[in-house]
Amino acid sequence: MSQQPLVEMIDIEKHFGGVRAVDQVSIKLFEGEVVGLLGHNGAGKSCLMRILAGAMVPSSGEIHVNGAPVQFAEPNDARAHGIETIYQTLALADHLDAPSNLFLGRELKTRFGNLDDAAMLRAAREVLARLNPNFKNLRDPVSSLSGGQRQVIAIARAIYFDTKVLIMDEPTAALGPSETAMVADLILQLRAEGIGIFLVSHDIHDVFDLCDRVVVMNKGRVVGAHAIGDVSKDDVLSLIVKGELPADWAARNLEGAQ
C-alpha cells in the first residue's frame, strides 16, 4: 500500500441550516484498498461521498488528491482527478446498448464530427471482456440485461476513463447470490489493479468479505475507523447502532495482541 493516499478528506463539514449532515469528518483511501463506509440512513455517509464525487460542495474542509489540495464544484471536476461514482440506481439509459451507455455524454467522434460507433463498440468489447469475458450481448438494450450485467456495464463505464478512485454505492443491492458473487469478484479484481474503492454498504457480510478497512458514521461523525481484522461484525454493529465499540473491545484486542 502506498504511503501517500490516493485521496484524503480532511475535517469535512456540510451544513443544511442548523443541521450538520457531515461533522468534521476525515477519511483517506490508499491505492489498491477497499474501505467500507457504513452507518444507518442519515448517518452522513452518502453526503460525504457526494462531496467527494463533486455532486455537493462542502461547507468547510479540504480534499487532497495524491497529496495536492483540490476543489470540486461539479462531478466533472472529480472525474478529471480520476474519481468516479457508481450510484445504486446505476444511472443507465435502459433503451440504449452497452457501448452507448459506456460513452454516454462522452461519445467518441470521427474526424468529421460524427459518432464513431465502431470505435465505441471496440472499446466497449475490450473493457467488458476485461471485467467479464462471458459478456457477449453488447448490442442488447440494457433493460433486457440481468442486474449483474447492468452492474458490469456501470463499472466498465467508471473504469474506462482512467479511474483511480471508485465510489460504489450499495453495488450488490437487489442482486441474487450468483450476481452478488460476480460483483464481489469484480471489486477484488479492481483492487488488485490498484484502484482504491469506497464501498458504501448496508451489508456487513460484504464489507467483511471485501474490505481492508471499515469506517462507521453516526449522526454525521466518524465513530470508528478500523482495519477489518481488528473488529468483529458485532463490534461494527455496535458502532452503527450505539456510536461506540462494546465495552470489552479493548480488552479483547489486548489479549489478541499478546
Image (cartoon, rainbow, N blue to C red):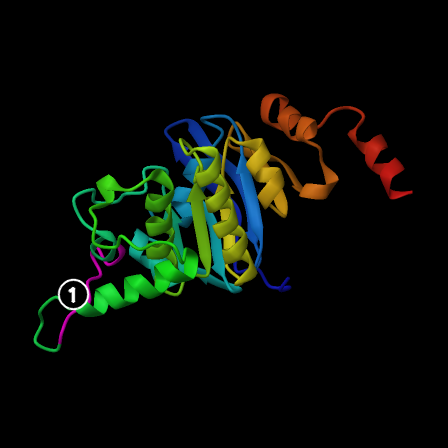
Q: Residues within 10 Å of mark 1 (few under 14, many from 20)?
A: some
Q: Residue furthest top?
A: 242
Q: Tell me which residue sits at (68%, 26%) in the image.
A: 234
Above or below, 181 relative to 156: above
Magenta region, main secondary structure:
loop
Residue 56 left/right relative to 116? right
Above or below, 95 relative to 68: above
Amino acid carrying label 1: it is Asp
Query: Residue 194: x percent and y percent?
Result: 54, 62
The residue lying toward the viewer, choosing from 156 and 3, is 156
Q: Tell me which residue sits at (20%, 46%) in the image.
A: 141
Q: Which residues are magenta?
A: 102-110
Question: Does the magenta segment cover residue 128?
Answer: no
Q: Tell me which residue sits at (39%, 59%) in the image.
A: 159
Query: Residue 74: x percent and y percent?
Result: 30, 52
Q: Which residue is mark 1?
A: 117
Query: Residue 49: x percent and y percent?
Result: 43, 43
Quarter of the figure with the C terminus? top right
Above or below, 243 relative to 156: above
Q: Is residue 56 visible?
A: no
